[in-house]
Amino acid sequence: MATARQALADLGFADVSSYVNSGNLLFSATGPASDHEVAIRTQLEAVFGFELTTFVRTAAQVRDLVGFKPFGAIAPGQTHFGLLPLTRLTATEKRAVEGLSNDHDEVVVHGRDVHWLIRSRSTETTLGPKRWKDALPDNPTTARNMTMLTRLADRL
């Protein structure tokens, strides 16, 4: 994470920090998030030597994601993820993603991102990577546990 933080500092971003060892970097900047995604991806690929995808959200977007509670209180033993697509979902993608919902996994699109409730541990989901890829074939995603995202939002 120290190398990743330095890479962002080298791009001129301010207040660069990381949150746990999860690839989550916090920074201050002006300008469009999409421009930052491209600059960060290019820089990190040069530093680390492999292809990767970056997902940039503003502090307000993160707070909105964790503040929206489509499932109410999460019961013990259940798992709530925030799924962050690279680009805003099209109407077709939104239908495909929400169509993944079943008795065990519930999916709700809210704004740009997706709330995903697993009515068990995450390893017992019915929605593995292939199902997400089928629903979003041209839109990479990353998922984060909502507990972790809530803690991260408290730092913003």
Image (tube, grey):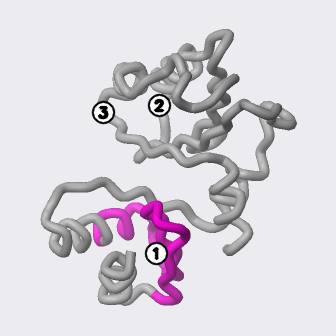
Give the camera-side residue of 90 and 142: 142
Residue at the disc numbered 1:
31
Say which element carries label 2.
loop
Give the camera-side residue of 97 and 18: 18
The reply to whether residue 108 is visible in this rendering is no
The reply to whether residue 50 is visible in this rendering is yes
Q: Amino acid at mark 2?
A: Thr
- Image side of residue 95 versus residue 147, left or right: left
Q: Residues within 10 Å of mark 3 (few under 14, many from 20)?
A: few
Q: Which residues are drawn in magenta?
A: 14-39
Q: Earlier in the sequence, mark 1 or mark 3?
A: 1
Residue at the disc numbered 2:
90
Does residue 19 show up magenta in the picture? yes
Q: Measured from the top left, where is residue 9 in percent x and y?
A: 37, 88
- In the rendered image of this protein, does residue 91 appear above or below residue 73? above
Q: Residues within 10 Å of mark 2 (few under 14, many from 20)?
A: few
Q: Are marks 2 and 3 in contact (CB under 8 Å)?
A: no
Q: Measured from the top left, where is residue 85 in percent x and y?
A: 46, 42
Q: Amino acid at mark 3?
A: Asp
Name the mark on residue 136: none
Residue at the disc numbered 3:
138
Q: Measured from the top left, where is residue 96 in percent x and y?
A: 49, 18
Q: Earlier in the sequence, mark 2 or mark 3?
A: 2
